[in-house]
Amino acid sequence: MPTYAYACKDCSHAFEIQQSFSDNSLSVCPECSGNLRKKFNSVGVVFKGSGFYRTDSRDTKSTSTVPAASKSESPASAPAAAPAPAAAAPAAS
C-alpha cells in the first residue's frame, strides 16, 4: 500500500498515512478539524534492463569517432592504419 503525506492548511500539522489506491483522499485534519491538502513527493523510479539509455538503441555506425574532414578524403590519400602491437606475455615468477 502506498504512503501519502498530508498537511493541514489551518494548523500546519503534517503526517503520513498508508492508504489503498481505491481509498478517498483525507480532507479533515485529525488535530484541528481543518482542511487538509495532499503533499506530493518525488517518485523514486528505477529503470532496469536494456533500452533505457541513449546509447542502447543506436547502432555502431552512427557513433563513429572519425572526424568529418577525414571522411571526405579518398582511401588512397589517407595514411594506412598501423597494426595493433601484440600483447606481451606476462613474466613468469
Image (cartoon, rainbow, N blue to C red):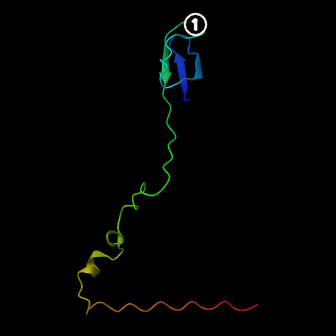
The mark tally for this picture is: 1
Give the position of the C terminus as an image quadrant.
Answer: bottom right
Three-letter amino acid code of the residue under disc 1:
Cys
In this view, the residue farthest toward the right is 93
Q: Nearer the viewer, residue 49 or 16?
A: 49
Is the residue 91 above or below the residue 57 in the image? below
Residue at the top extreme of this rendering: 33
Q: Position of residue 2 (x, y in %)?
A: 54, 29
Using the image, determine if residue 86 lies above or below residue 30: below
Residue 79 at what x, y percent from top left? 33, 91
In this view, 72 is above or below 87: above
Q: Label 1, on which residue?
A: 32
Relative horizontal placement of residue 18, taking residue 23 as reference (left or right): right
Q: Residue furthest front?
A: 22
Q: Position of residue 84 (x, y in %)?
A: 47, 89
In x, y percent, where is residue 16? 59, 23
Classed neighbour count for the residue bearing mark 1: other residues with Cα under 10 Å, few (<14), some (14–19), many (≥20): few
Quadrant that contains the N terminus: top right
Q: Helix, strand, or loop for circle 1?
A: loop
Viewer-side residue, 64 vs 72: 64
Residue sitting at x 52%, y 40%: 44
Which residue is rendered at x = 59% and y = 10% of the image? 30
Nearest the viewer among 19 and 17 is 19
Nearer to me, 54 or 22: 22
**Which residue: 60% across, 9% down?**
31
Residue at 58% across / 7% down in the picture? 32
